[in-house]
Every structure is written in structure tokens, then in C-alpha cells.
Image (cartoon, coloured by chain):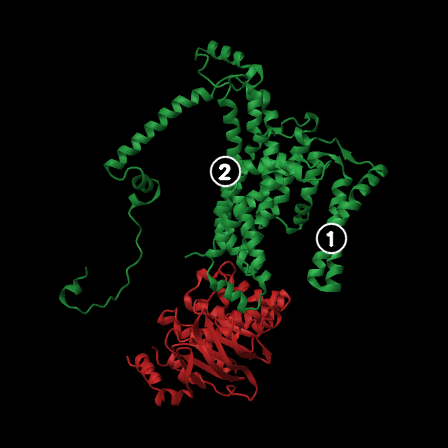
Chain colours: A green, B red
Amino acid sequence: MSNTHADTVLFVRDTMLPQKNPPSTSVGAVGWARENLFAGWGNTILTLLAFAVVYYLLAGILPWLISPTFGAESLTECREILAAKGVGSHGGACWGVISERWKQLLFGFYPAEAYWRPILTFVLLFVAISPVLFADYVTPKLLWFTALFPFLAVWLLWGGSLWTPVTVLAGFVVGAVFLSMGSKIGGAIVGVIAAILGAVLWWAVAAAPLASGLSSVVEIGLLPVESRDFGGFLLAITLGVTAIFGSLPLGIILALGRRSDLLLVKSLCVGFIEFIRGVPLITLLFVASTLLNIFLPPGTNFDIILRVMIMMTLFAAAYMAEVIRGGLAALPTGQYEAADALGLDYWKAQRLIIMPQALKISIPGIVSTFIGVFKDTTLVSIISLFDPLGLANAIRADGAWTGIYWELFIFIGVVFFIFCFSMSRYSMYLERKLQTGHH
Amino acid sequence: MSDLATQREIDRTKMQVSDEIAIEIVNMNKWYGTFHVLRDINLTVNRGERIVIAGPSGSGKSTLIRCINRLEEHQQGKIVVDGTELTSDLKNIDKIRSEVGMCFQHFNLFPHLTILENCTLAPIWVRKTPKKEAVETAMHFLEKVKIPDQANKYPGQLSGGQQQRVAIARSLCMKPRIMLFDEPTSALDPEMIKEVLDTMIELAEEGMTMLCVTHEMGFARQVANRVIFMDQGQIVEQNEPEEFFNNPQSERTKLFLSQILGH
């Protein structure tokens, strides 16, 4: 209190106070510890108690984890090693199963001499998604590779003639040509219809004979690998990545459709979303593995992994649509009005104004859905595909490893955690990057 | 209410009303559901006119100017802007929207884009202006509203008054022939109202056709050549500002003016 104030009501400050440093006990490491760990007696006791619990848990778990059993070739051998160490036959983990079977857990029954193909695909996957994930640091020219990557990945993983993906890719070129010709002749709608018809016709009639014709002239191919040989994390990642990158655009379209004024579009989207969300994923997977064949013409061999991919993508897209719809609903109507008032048409407004903001709002929900989808790939063990968990069961059926549980599940859990945690960290990076408020 | 927006003399050399019609509204009616918001609106705006629309809240004044660029759809009557009639034809709507600029009460800048990007977006994507030219135009108008140094900041980093001036610059970048203002100063602190009004006055001095929904009666007195008073979805009274303020005719207008000028 100023002395002036005591004498009279009139108060005029003639010097402004300079800024002072805060007391040293409220900043830095000391300040942090005081505020968070030792703020008062109760708080201090809880902190010490928490330290004790953490110590007790680690003291129990760490010796079990750090167990010198990497060389063991069976559970019995493990127990002998542990008994010789004097920690009791159940006193340590049996890592022999991981060192013997880790390749199988990663690749399933994929032929060992072709392991380089999934590894290369995995590395190229990061090259392909880098211009999308880190647009600030990677040249946008790389987006061409991103567009080509799905075809390259399919060829590398499943093998066979190079000409098959090339002719399929050519279908898109045919579509593009029809689109530009059609829109010149009869406007945008005619163009789109012509493009779809042209591409479908190409795939149905021309693609297969052309591919076999070309491969009879120049044979470029890789050893074909059957879908049934895919397994482990190779299968989980293949399914997960496809469902993740397929569901986002599909989810955006469904979310926009659900908010559309066109009754037909709206009802279709609402119907689709509500149906898919109302049915358990396992049911859809059963439909994919058994029922779908009944509806297809006899003799069609529709690849099982492709069927599962489609089902998982549709399933994830329905959830994605609702997450994105939440983001759209959170945008103030003023943004739509400002875009309209500037003369932007619907698609430009969506692309430039609405979606960038709605997707940013939805990032936590979108990434949660991604992580959920990735973990849901383990459900395919129900329809006897060998995802990591399915493989774990298969390994335990082997006489040498009967009775082993923890080690396999810990390994699988750790690998899943690395992927899911990276996604979560990336989403936080993205949220920070897109933060423009500075309020 | 601040009675005088600015102390300086207003340069009226270019503030001339021509005979050319900019906006023509004939027997226009609009309903929200069963609620009759706009009733038999007839209004002709000549090029170069500066019209202030006043009235109590809920009188339909915002809805009226939002009909002019079809942010709201009218159900009966005719609205012709710059010789193009507003119908459900999307091409006409987009054409009119790119000729008519609009400023909102809450600015509605795009928070994910920088100030400069806010200003260049529509010229680049709607007018197909080359980027370099769009940036030059944007900087020109940002200088005009006196915030060129903020060009690379985001809207969230600017004060309300600055944001509203950016919003005006963003509209001007489309080189509109008509500007609509929907309560541009209602969300601002008193200290910031003046800077926005000054910008609007400068715009009027250049001969822009303007329709402003506002409670700034000082601005209306100084700049407007016509004041329109609306109540219950109808135009109750319109007159030149001097006459409107000194000699209001209808009882409703007298009551309104006594309430907003009386303290």
C-alpha cells in the first residue's frame, strides 16, 4: 500500500513498477519439485509412498525380465538354465522362444529367402508417407511416389509378374483420359461417368490379357507368395496401414455426405455408417471370410486378405466419419459464411477452409481410431489368418514351447506399443505444429 | 455510443451517388419456418450510396443484408445485384458473391491461415489471379488498413480491431463493387471501434457502395447519405441522416433514437 493513499483518495502513480524476478523456490527444478512432489505434508507422504510402490514393483519384475535364456531351444532347457543359476525354474523369463521365433512373429510363413521384400516395402512405406506426414521438410514432388506406392507394395509383397500392377495402374490413366475427353464433350458429370466406365472396362477386359501378353514378351516377376503365407506383424501392418489410409478419405466423404442437403446422399451415408457401427467387426470379418463367396459368381477367387482389407477399411471409415463429423460440427458457422461470402464454391470451401480446420480439431479422435484399427487387426485370428496373436497360439502348440505365455505376449505387446505410441506422439507433434491460436 | 467517429474532415469529392442502380430489391419476403422475418422489402441502392441500416435487435436488418449475397435465401420477390438476379442458380450466386464483399460482426477470419493467406485465398482460387499479383494486391490493401507488418501472423495473434481491418482488406482484395457490413464494430472494445470506423470512412471517401448494419450513429451522421430504420422485419422509415436524427417521423423511430442517443 502506498502512503499517499492513506492520506487522500486522490492517487496518481508517478513511476511505473519494474518487473521483478519470481522467488527462486518457485522456479526451476526446486520449484517444480516443491509444487508437484512436496507441496505440504500429505503430498510428501504420498510421494514417498509412490516411490516405494514403484521400487517394489521393479524389484519384482526386473530380475524376471533380465534372464539369461536367449540361447535356450525349448522351455525345458530354459528351466534348466534358470535352475542352474539358482533362481528357481520359474524365476526368470524364457527369451529363447523369442530369439528362435521372432522372424516368424514378424513375417508369419512368408518364405525366408524373400524377407527382403516386406522389409523393403516397410522402408518404402515411410518414404511414401513422409511427404504427407512431414510436409514442411519433404519435397511435395515425392507425392508421385506416394501415389505409386500402393501398386509397388502389392507387387513386392505378393510377387508375380510386374505387368499386373502396371496394367492395373494403366486403368487409372485410361480413366483420366476418359475424364478429360468426357468433360470436354458433355460436362463434368459425363466426364466422371465416362472415366469410371472406361477404367472398369479396361480392368475387366483388357488388363489381364495385356498383362499376360506383356509377360510372355518380357518376363519380369518376383516369386509369387500366397496370402495364406502372410502372418505376424507383416499381416497386421499390411491390414492396418491399408485400413488406416483407406478409411481417412472414405470417412471424409461419408462425413460430408451425412451433412449434405441432398436427401439421397444423406440417407445412403447415414444408413452405411449406422449399419457398420451397429455390427461387431468380428461379424463383418466372418462375412468377409465365408459369406462373401456365396454372393460372388462361382469360380471367382477373391483373395482373403483383400476381402479382410475391404471390410476393415469400411469398418474404420464408419467410425472415422463420425469423428470427422464432430470436427465439422465444432466449426463456427461464420467460417462457412466467410467462405461463401468470398465466392468459394462448395468443394473449394471444403478443401481450403473447412477440412483443414475440422481435421485439425479431430486429430485426437482420428488417431484414436487409427490406433484402434491397428489393434483390431488381431481379430483376424478368428477367421484363421495368422496375425501375431494367432501365431503365438501356433507357437505354443509346438511341443518345445508348450506352456509358454508371458514372453510371447510381452514381445507382441511391446511391438504393438511401439507402433501405437509413435502414432500418438506424431499426433501430438501435428497438433503443436498446427496450433495457430497463441491466445 | 461514440457520437463522432473521427475528428477529421471528410473528403467528399469522390462521394457521389450515380444514377446507375447497384442493388434493387422488389417486394421481397422471407420466412424462418413460419416466422415472417422480412416483410415486403423494397429498396433501391444506387452506385456510390452509403446506407446505414439501424433498428432494434431482431428487426431483420442483418437478415436483409445477408439476403443480398444469399447467405440467406429469400422466398418471395426479387433481388437484383449488379444486373444479375439472385436465383437458385449457383453460377449467379458465385458471381454475385465475388462482386460483393462482406464483413461480419465476428470477423470470421480463417484462423489456420496467415493474414496474407487470408487475403490472397479468394483472389487465387476464385479469380485465378497469379500468386505474385495476389500477394501484391493483398499487401496494398493491408497497407491501406495500416497493418502490413502483421502480414505473416495468424489471426489469433491480432487484436479485435486489427482482425476486423484484416477482414475488410480480405474483402477488398476481391475488388468488390459493393461492400456489406454486418455490425462490424459490435464485438469490439471502445478503443478499437475508432480504427475500424476510420477504415470504413476511407472506403466511403473512395466512392464505394456500402450497406452497413451498425449502431454507430456518429458514423451514420458523418458518412451515410441515407439511414434506414427497420422494425419487425419492415422498413419503417428512411431519410437523409440530418433529417432522420433531427426530425424522425414515426413514433417507433423516435423511441429507438431516444433510447440509443439518450445517454
Mark-to-mark CA distance, 2 and 1: 43 Å
Q: Residue A77 at x, y = what percent?
A: 53, 12
Q: Is residue A396 left or right of residue A218?
A: left
Q: Specify the quadrant that holds the C terminus of chain A.
A: bottom left
Q: Which residue is mark 2?
A: A421
Which amino acid lies under the numbered mark 2 shown in the image of this protein? Phe
- Residue at 48% in and 79% down: B211
**Chain letter of disc 1?**
A
In-front residue for pair B235/A268:
A268
Label 2: few (<14), some or many (≥20) within 10 Å? few
Q: Residue B5 at x, y = what percent?
A: 39, 79
- Residue at 50% in and 72% down: B102
SS of the residue under disc 1: helix
Q: Is residue B188 above or below residue B251?
A: above
- Residue at 16% in and 62% down: A3
Which amino acid lies under the numbered mark 1 shown in the image of this protein? Leu
Label 1: few (<14), some or many (≥20) within 10 Å? some
**Is residue B181 something that shows in the picture?**
no
Q: Which residue is mark 1?
A: A197
In-front residue for pair B159/B77:
B77
Q: Residue A166 at x, y = what percent?
A: 76, 43
SS of the residue under disc 2: helix
